[in-house]
Amino acid sequence: MENFLHIAAVWLHVLGIALFVGPQFFLAFAWVPASRQIEDLQTRVAAMRTITTRFGWIGGIGLFLILVGGTYLIMTWRDYHNIVEGTAFFDLRYGVVFVIKMVLLVVMIVLVGLHMFVVGPSQVDAMEEQARGGAVSEKDIRRLRITSMVLSITGLILTLVIMGFGVSLGAAEYSLQQF
C-alpha cells in the first residue's frame, strides 16, 4: 500500500507540474506572438482575458496538486528512503536541497501572484481602455507589457530551476548523501 501511495503522490505532483508549467510555455511562446496578429484590439483583449483566466484556473489546480502530492512525499520521505533513526533533516543533501527548493517556490509564487493579480490585470485593463478610445498611452502599455514579460519569464525560469531541484531529490544516490 505504501508503494501505491508513493506512486500516486509522485503522479499527482508531476501532473500538477505539467498543469502549471505547460500553460506558461503556451502563453509565452504561442499565445503572445500569435495574439499580436489580431489587429482588432477589442478582440485581442477579449481573447487575452479569456485565455489568462483559464490559465489561472489550470495553474491553480496544478499548484494544488503539487501541494497535495508534495506534502505526502515530504511527510513520508524518511520511511520511503529507509533513513536511519536519529538522522537530522539537514544531515543529508535532501534537507538542504528541499529547503532551497521551497524558498525558490515561495519567491516564484509571489512573482506569479504579482503577475496574475496586479500586473496582468492592469495590462489587460489598460489595453481594454485604449481599445475603447481612452487616454492610455503606448508608453504606459509598453511599460506594463515589459513588466509582465519580466515577471513571466522570471517565473518560468524559477519553475524550471525548482523542477531541477525536485529531480535531484528523487535521485537517492545524490540526495541521500551526507551534507
Image: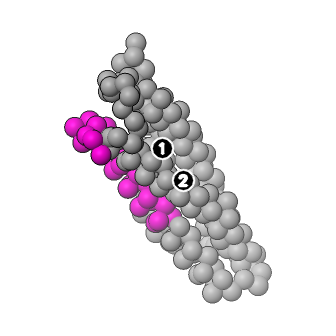
Q: Is residue 68 visible?
A: yes
In the rendered image, residue 156 lying in the magenta stretch gets the answer: yes
Q: Earlier in the sequence, mark 1 or mark 2?
A: 1
Does residue 91 appear left or right of residue 20 in this picture? Answer: left
Please identify the dominant SS of the magenta region: helix
Label placed on residue 106: 2
Local SS, label 1: helix
Residue at 52 percent across and 57 percent down: it is 108
- Residue at 51% across / 33% down in the picture? 71
* Residue stretch rendered in magenta on the structure: 152-179
131 is higher (above) or lower (below) than 155: below
Amino acid at dot 1: Leu
Q: Amino acid at mark 2?
A: Val
How far is mark 1 from mark 2, CA to CA? 18 Å
x and y, in percent, of residue 141 in the image: 63, 79
**Would you say 102 lies left or right of 177 here?**
right
Residue 76 sits in quarter? top left
Quarter holding the N terminus is top left
Q: Residues within 10 Å of mark 2 (few under 14, many from 20)?
A: few
How many labels were placed on the picture? 2
Query: x and y percent of residue 97 in the render?
Result: 37, 47
Q: Residues within 10 Å of mark 1 (few under 14, many from 20)?
A: many
Callout 2: helix, strand or loop?
A: helix
The residue labelled by disc 1 is: 19
Query: Residue 75's spot in the image, x, y percent?
Result: 47, 29
